[in-house]
Amino acid sequence: MDLITLKDWDKEDILHLIDEAMLIKEDPEKYYKVLKGKTLAMLFEKTSTRTRISFEAGMAQLGGHALFIDWSSTQLGKADIKDEIKCISRYVDVIMARVYGHKKIEVMAENSSKPVINALSDRYHPCQTLADLLTIKERFGKFKGLKVSWVGDGNNVCNSLILGCRKVGIKISVAVPKGYEPIENPDLLTDEVKAVKGADVVYTDTWISMGQEKEKAKRLKVFRPYQVNKKLLGKALFMHNLPAYRGYEVTDEVLDSSQSIVFDQAENRLHAQKALLLRLMGKI
C-alpha cells in the first residue's frame, strides 16, 4: 500500500488512520519501539521544513531511523529514477519523497518494492490533508455537517484537501481566480465572499509556490482580492499549511488570532504521519 494521492484510500482507511493518530498523540510513549530496526528513506528534490522535521522526528519517536537524502547531492537527479528507486527500496522499509513533478512519485511507486509516500508533488499533498483532517476532528469532534472553504490558488494542497473532505463527508467550496482552478473540481466560486458563507473553516495557502517565482508580479495582482482578512474570515477557524506570507494571502490579525489553528495543523503533521508510517508497515 502506498500514499500517492487520497484517491486510492477509501473513507474507512482515512477515518481509521485519523483515529489512530489521535491515540498516538494522546499516548506517544506506547509507540516508542514499534518501528525498532525499521528505516525510512526521505528523498528531497524540493526544500522543506515541516515535512522533513515531522517525518524524521516521527520515525525516531517510533523507534526507527530516517535517512535524509538530498536530491542534488546524490544520483537521483542524474540516473534513471526507476533504477535508483529499485536500489533504494532494497535498503529501507519505506520511502517518502518531496518532488516537483507528480509523475516522479508515480514512477517511484511503480518500481519500489516498499511503500512509497508522496510528501508533496506539484499536484497533490496528501500528508498535509491527513494532518488537516486530524486537526478538524480534534476541534469539532466530527466531519459530517461541516463546511471548509478554500480561498486562493487551486494548487496541490487544495487538490488533496478536496479529495480528503469528499472522502469523509465534509462540504468544501473553493474560490479561485479564473485560470487557477484545482484539478479536483468541487463547487467552484470566483466570489470569495460567497465561498466562505457559512464556513466552519477558511483555508488558504501561499499565492506563489516553489517554482513559480517568475510569476510573482502577476500572481500578486491576480490573488490580491483573495486575501484572508478579519472581515472575510468572520467567525470561522483559520487554517494554512505554512509557511505563510504575512500581508499577502493572510493578514497578521488573522494569523495571530485565537481563530487561527495553523500551529495545531503543523504539529499534527507529526502525529498523522506516525500513524501513516505504522499503517504502511502493517503495525496498525
Image (cartoon, rainbow, N blue to C red):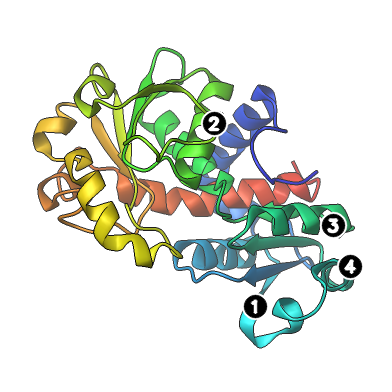
Of mark 3 and mark 4, the one earlier in the sequence is: 4
Q: Are marks 1 and 3 in contact (CB under 8 Å)?
A: no
Of mark 2 and mark 1, the one earlier in the sequence is: 1
Front: mark 1 or 3: 1
Numbered circle sitting on residue 190: none
Query: What is the distance, in whole Å, between disc 2 and disc 1 at their CAs?
Result: 29 Å
For label 1, the residue is 71
Identify the image quadrant of residue 73.
bottom right
Of mark 4 and mark 2, the one earlier in the sequence is: 4
Identity, as a three-letter code, of the amino acid under mark 4: Lys
Of mark 4 and mark 1, the one earlier in the sequence is: 1
For label 3, the residue is 114
Query: What is the distance, in whole Å, between disc 4 and disc 2 at their CAs?
Result: 31 Å
For label 2, the residue is 184
Q: Are marks 4 and 2 in contact (CB under 8 Å)?
A: no
Query: Number of callouts in the render?
Result: 4
Identify the image quadrant of residue 184.
top right
Residue at image position (19%, 40%) is 228
Identity, as a three-letter code, of the amino acid under mark 2: Glu
Identity, as a three-letter code, of the amino acid under mark 1: Trp
SS category of the residue bearing label 2? loop
SS category of the residue bearing label 3? loop
Query: What is the distance, in whole Å, between disc 2 and disc 3 at their CAs?
Result: 28 Å
Horizontal side of 121 relative to 200 (left or right) equals right
Of mark 2 and mark 3, the one earlier in the sequence is: 3
Query: What is the distance, in whole Å, between disc 4 and disc 1 at their CAs?
Result: 16 Å
Q: Position of residue 216 (x, y in %)?
A: 30, 61
Front: mark 3 or 4: 4
Identity, as a three-letter code, of the amino acid under mark 3: Lys
Q: Position of residue 211 (x, y in %)?
A: 46, 65
Query: What is the distance, in whole Å, between disc 3 and disc 4 at their CAs?
Result: 9 Å
For label 4, the residue is 86
